[in-house]
Image (cartoon, rainbow, N blue to C red):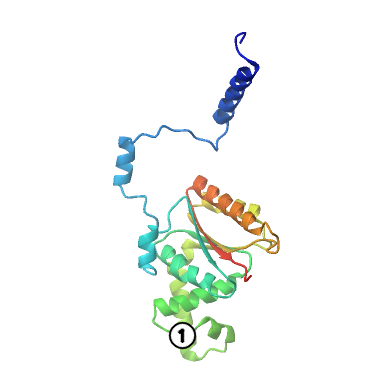
Amino acid sequence: FSRMSTSEIYNYYEHQLNHTFIDVESDVKIEDFDITDSYLNKINEGNDLGASISSALPRLNSDMGGIRDRNVVIVSASTGVGKTSFVFGCMILPLIKQGIKTAIISNEQGLDDFRAVMLSSVLFTEFSYYKITRRRIMAGKFNEEEWDMLKKAKDFINQKYTPYLKFVKMFEYNVVKTQKVIKKLAREGFSKFVYDVFKSVDSSSSDSVGMMVELSKAFFNLADKLDISVVITQQTALY
């Protein structure tokens, strides 16, 4: 040290502190960038493709490589254009059809809203029955034929889909609590999550876009750590 300048001594200790920090922190990993035999064997297995949604969206499934683990998919649109219905029919149903445990986390719509989407979707896709839409379910007072079809759909859903689907109602917009719920369900074997709906707490704020980006990064980091996928419906502003 006697021949080192003050700046050199400072840089030396800073390097040592940084080295210690990286060693003790679990969210930092430094690796050599070599192509190993184990990596080649891994990619040969073809496991990097995600869960398929080709039954609903074959072109998008091909472009995306499915709903991949350690990743976040954001479906963004303005309010009232059908984000939830799109995600349910084109992503949730294809996943649970394959026996993939999927959780819906909603901070707006309740369980009955999603039950209505499920019933109408199953009647359409599995029974080719088009008379019971979501609007028809809201109106009620079903005739004998409609009752018969609803009961068939109920039995089908409870047998085929219910074991792989969980619903979580969040009564406040709290991303931290949502992440805790995801961690809990991930430990129970759920690997796909739909978060409905993601929006800025204060859309009038000049920094609302930056806040949304940071929150999106938080979900991506969580997905990466837990080896899961998160599909987010995002509400965009109309101005």
Q: Amino acid at mark 1?
A: Asp
Q: Return the x and y of residue 91 as percentages of the image width and height.
A: 45, 65
Task: Relative to 57, say whether 225 is above or below.
Answer: above
Determine whether 71 is above or below 147 in the image: above
Is 53 positioned to the left or the right of 114 in the image?
left
Tell me: 112 left or right of 96: right
Q: Residue 160: x and y, percent?
A: 42, 68
Residue at 58 percent of width and 27 percent of height: 18
Q: Inspect this view and state whether residue 54 appears.
A: no
Quarter of the image for residue 4 reads top right
Residue ID at (70%, 64%): 204
Q: Decide which of 33, 112 is in the foreground and name it.
A: 33
Q: Taking the image as drawn, is residue 108 in sight?
A: yes
Residue 192: percent from left, percent from top: 48, 57
Which residue is under mark 1?
148
Q: Choose top left, top right, bottom left or bottom right for residue 135.
A: bottom right
Q: As drawn, is 9 to the left or to the right of 42? A: right
In the image, is 119 to the left or to the right of 62?
right
**Which residue is found at the position 60% from the left and 22% from the top?**
11
- Residue 176 spot, x, y in % from top left: 65, 52
